[in-house]
Amino acid sequence: MSRTRFQEVTALPAPSAHLSSREKTGSLRAVLMLLLLVAAAAATSPAQTFKTLHSFCSVTSSAGYCLDGQNPSTTLVQGANGYLYGTTFYGGSNNGNYGTVFKLAPGGKLTTIYNFCSLASCADGTNPQGGLVLATNGSFYGVTNQGGVFGYGTVFKITAAGKLTTLHSFDNTDGAYPEVGLIQATNGNFYGTTNGGGAYGAGAAFEVTASGTLTTLYSFCDNGSSCFTGDSPNGLTQAADGNFYGTNYSGGGSPNTNDCSPYSGGGTAFQLTSSGTLTMLVQEFCEPNGVYPNSALVQAASGNFYGTSAAGGDGSNTGSGTFYEMTPTGSLTSLYSFCLQTGCADGSNPQALILAPDGNFYGTTKFGGANSGTGTAFEITSTGQPTTLHTFTGTDGINPSGALLLDTSGTFYGTTWSGGKNGSYGTVFSLATGLGAFVETIPTSGKAGTKVTILGTNLKGATAVRFNGTAATIKVASGSDITTTVPIGATSGTVTVTTLSGTTLSSSVAFQVP
């Protein structure tokens, strides 16, 4: 198994005993008094609509396994057919806790489309983690944390109908135990990281083609046992300059200094080219900017990156994590330290972020909140002003995991690792905050003639598609997707769709025409 992450002093009760290797253990807060509940309610935006869509382990086998899966450690993804897709780390129908792939209808009905360890010796992998990415070819791609031919995890492709193809089995020398989902880069290939393995056992960054040819780009910790380049990478983000940026959960520092007391080896940030050249941007995360960065970076229109740390921060409650900004050259600024509010109502141990069309960031905290440390969902501005959107209670989930998904209707979707009406098995939830509908393009860049799929809501009968004002031909228009091509003369900018009712929907990300 991959290495153990940072743990706070006080452990969680029974539900967190099921956490995967990446899940960080956090502290329980004391039972909240009425006064704290009132204070938390005052800090929560009142216009939210939260729904629990599915509680896992709704169906069990005679042996007691959760046939619909359990403990999702995933970020959901919107498919071209309007369904949401995700994975569970445990559960399934193959007489063991090997995990599943599921789809979720807009109304909340969940269907398992694949059960892992369906092949002899679990050659198809076990325990998927990090979620799926919808590729330009219409299939989904993901990783399993374990299983495969060598037992160190796999890369796989799966169709919307549930046909799975194992593309690569990690053998430890090229990486082991991937925990973060893949991204598809502008060249069409997929990029990701493993939590362990590689040449030095501290994780690796890799590239894999759609057909499964894998190349290890960089093995971390190549300079001795202190891991000055970092240890346990958190996935990759492709920036506007075409390079990849990421963080390592631990490691870093300098052989001649120890500037991060009381923490040591608090993580690093780096730039990685497509050919595998690594440049250190943050030699070591230190206070008060936070330590143990635990999420992939998000690049804003300004060019700067934003992320979260699992621990550290400024103020009296250091150790609860931060929201930080990083320039492309590695200059760090902590924008908010969690657990500053009374009773830790603003949460602790923030998870991965997404950037919404309104310019704000949205995410979850695994712990903290006004209900004995069961986690929160939050919004935070680029200047670090937070708003708690929802505090989990237990029956609606405990310990949210993975980044939120903002689907094209303007509604957020997410998962919790534990909790739910059936016990400690996790949930899928939705959260509406009043954001409007938009469209999403796959891919987000391409020259004239490139095939583009536009995802959206209520697109049937759409009358026009424009790339930064240049009209494109609509080839296929259904309720959830449009197929088109980049028109001749198009320039970089917003893609717009005019619906049958006359509404104009805009893309949340500018389409880049090289």
Image (cartoon, rainbow, N blue to C red):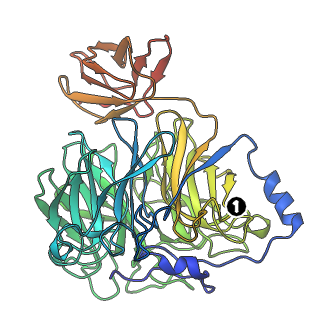
Q: Nearer the viewer, residue 338 or 502?
A: 502
Density class for disc 1 (Cα within 10 Å; few <14, some 14-19, many ≥20) is: many
Residue depicted at x 20% and y 66%: 124
Residue 343 as seen in the image, left or right of residue 435:
right
Q: Nearer the viewer, residue 261 or 60?
A: 60
- Residue 25 appears in the picture as rendered: no
Residue positioned most to the bottom = 225
Residue 495 as seen in the image, left or right of residue 184:
right
Residue positioned most to the front = 62
From the top left corner, tell me how far across and down residue 19 is, in percent.
47, 76
From the top left corner, tell me how far across and down residue 263 is, in percent.
53, 83
The kind of secondary structure element at disc 1 is loop
- Residue 495 appears in the picture as rendered: yes
Residue depicted at x 55% and y 84%: 261
In the rendered image of this protein, does residue 94 appear above or below residue 86? Answer: below
Residue depicted at x 56% and y 76%: 15
Quadrant of the rendered structure where residue 359 is? top right
Q: Nearer the viewer, residue 445 or 125?
A: 125
Q: Nearer the viewer, residue 369 or 103?
A: 103
Image quarter of the C terminus: top left
- Which residue has dot 1 on it? 346
Residue positioned most to the right = 35
Image quarter of the N terminus: bottom left
From the top left corner, tell me how far across and down residue 491 is, in percent.
30, 22
Quadrant of the rendered structure where residue 198 is? bottom left
From the top left corner, tell me how far across and down residue 504 is, in percent.
48, 17
Residue depicted at x 40% and y 53%: 328
- Label 1 is placed on what type of residue? Asp
Residue 212 as seen in the image, left or right of residue 95:
left
Quadrant of the rendered structure where residue 262 is? bottom right
